[in-house]
Amino acid sequence: MLFIMAKSTMGTKLPRKLEDKMRMVGEQIRLARLRRNLTIAQVADRATCSPLTINRVEKGTPTVSIGIYLRVLYALQLDDDILLIARHDELGRQLQDLSLKQRVRASKKS
């Protein structure tokens, strides 16, 4: 009998640059919570998760699911901010423009 094990990504370390960005996102969420004068317990209740999870979000722990981040943003009334991700894809637009075929006009007949 052959068992195929799925590769676990839980132990995979993020590149330093991404770890820094995760910490920044967590810090921004923490500051948003503090500006609203909410406790971790209140946000956890509104986001239907544990205070420990909110703590992990605010630390930028990369193993927290995107769904949890969305629920926390929703609890802080910041859920529309998720729509800003990849909104201004300049590189993608430039690549797309390069691949567009140029229209060729038919030659004029005399």
Image (cartoon, rainbow, N blue to C red):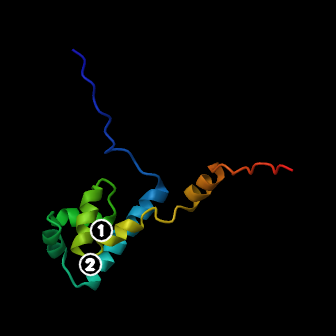
Left or right: 69, with 50 as reference point? right
Q: Residue at x 40, y 48 (%)?
A: 13
The one nearer the camera, 72 or 101, is 101
The one nearer the camera, 15 or 99, is 99
Dividing the picture into quarters, in which one does residue 41 lie?
A: bottom left
Amino acid on which disc 1 is placed: Glu
Amino acid on which disc 2 is placed: Arg
Left or right: 109, with 34 as reference point? right
Dividing the picture into quarters, in which one does residue 66 lie?
A: bottom left
Secondary-structure class at tag 1: helix
Q: Residue at x 27, y 64 (%)?
A: 70
Distance, label 2 to label 1, CA atoms, is 10 Å
Left or right: 37, with 8 as reference point? left
Q: Position of residue 47 (x, y in %)?
A: 18, 67
Q: In the picture shown, does residue 63 fall above or below 11?
A: below
Q: Which residue is mark 2?
A: 33
Q: Which residue is mark 1?
A: 58
Q: Label 1: how many residues lie within 10 Å, few (<14), some (14-19) or many (20+)? A: many
Q: Are marks 2 and 1 in contact (CB under 8 Å)?
A: yes
Q: In the picture shown, does residue 107 fall above or below 39?
A: above
Q: Position of residue 55 (x, y in %)?
A: 24, 66
Q: Position of residue 22 (x, y in %)?
A: 39, 62
Secondary-structure class at tag 2: helix
Q: Position of residue 108 (x, y in %)?
A: 81, 51
